[in-house]
Image: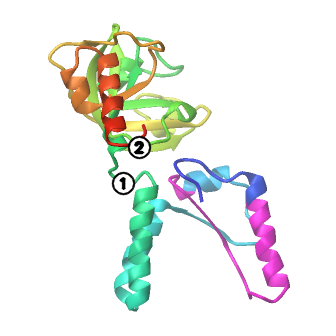
Amino acid sequence: AKLGWNLPAESQVRTYEARILDEIDSGRIESGALVTLSECSEDWALAKLPADGVIPRRHLTWQELVALADIAAPRSGFHEKRLLRDLAAYLRSATNMHDDPSSQMTWVVPVSHNSADGSALNFIETVKVGYYYNTAKKVPKSPFNFIGFRWQSALQEIRYVKSRRLFTDPHEALPEIFKESSTWGDHELFELGPAIVPNKPIPYGKLWAPGHHRALLDCLLTSSTVAEARDESRERFRAAGLEL
């Protein structure tokens, strides 16, 4: 089981397979299967994980596991019903599915007039038609609901994240922008909502690393700089005894 888009390493998968085989060989169980859990879709996970061994394998998303618990709870006995509901509540709080304070953060990223190889649109134009993508390793692991976009040295607009998924072939992910298939490393694609445009562009201010930063949405819309919004957001979290 992994948080976010992470998947177990091949060594982990083989270790658990060996444990299941030992249980079968000893007669303690008749059969077994290996289930992996993460935010990744089944197709993505099975393409990345090592091929099936002698143990049947299945991948579930956290959402699917929570849905199974929700379906099973009403059909169960009193104690089982309580345990299943507790399990579903815990999983919602422990994964990216919950609405915790950090999910209200806006991830602020720079975009430019440059284009990715094979793209019919530059990065700003891609945002304008409702999409943003980046290498998966550069995306924050903690949840967020909004992305703010900076160009011309200022935050120009903020957009709600309607959906997000992983891809390696840009044509498969965005066929209207990439006309030919190619093989990239792991990337994440965000489908975006309509633009929230500040009254005027918000300059970055005194930020040591003017790349990717996070701040609460209302702080961004009411502060004179992104740096001020970031600092105010951090102060709110500290006052509430929370960590960003």
Q: Residue at x 46, y 54 (%)?
A: 95
Image height check: is 228 above or below 164?
Answer: above
Query: In this orientation, which residue lies closer to the viewer: 33 or 239?
Result: 239
Q: Position of residue 82 (x, y in %)?
A: 39, 81
Figure quadrant of the C terminus:
top left
**Identity, as a three-letter code, of the amino acid under mark 1:** His
Disc 1 versus disc 2: distance between alpha carbons? 8 Å
Asked whether disc 1 touches disc 2, contact meaning CB atoms under 8 Å apart, the reply is: yes
**Identity, as a three-letter code, of the amino acid under mark 2:** Pro
Q: Residue at x 38, y 90 (%)?
A: 78
Disc 1 crowd, CA 10 A, few/some/many (<14, 14-19, 20+): some
Q: Is residue 147 left or right of residue 42?
A: left
Q: Position of residue 131 (x, y in %)?
A: 36, 32
What span is colored magenta in the figure?
A: 13-42
Residue 32 within the magenta-colored segment of the rendering: yes
Q: Residue at x 42, y 68 (%)?
A: 66
Image height check: is 120 above or below 61?
Answer: above
Mark earlier in primary sequence (1, 2): 1
- Asked whether the viewer can see residue 2, the reply is yes
Res 220 quadrant in image: top left
Query: In this orientation, which residue lies closer to the viewer: 157 or 99?
Result: 99
Residue 161 within the magenta-colored segment of the rendering: no
The residue labelled by disc 2 is: 143
Q: Position of residue 89 (x, y in %)?
A: 38, 67
Res 216 quadrant in image: top left
Figure quadrant of the N terminus:
bottom right
The residue labelled by disc 1 is: 98
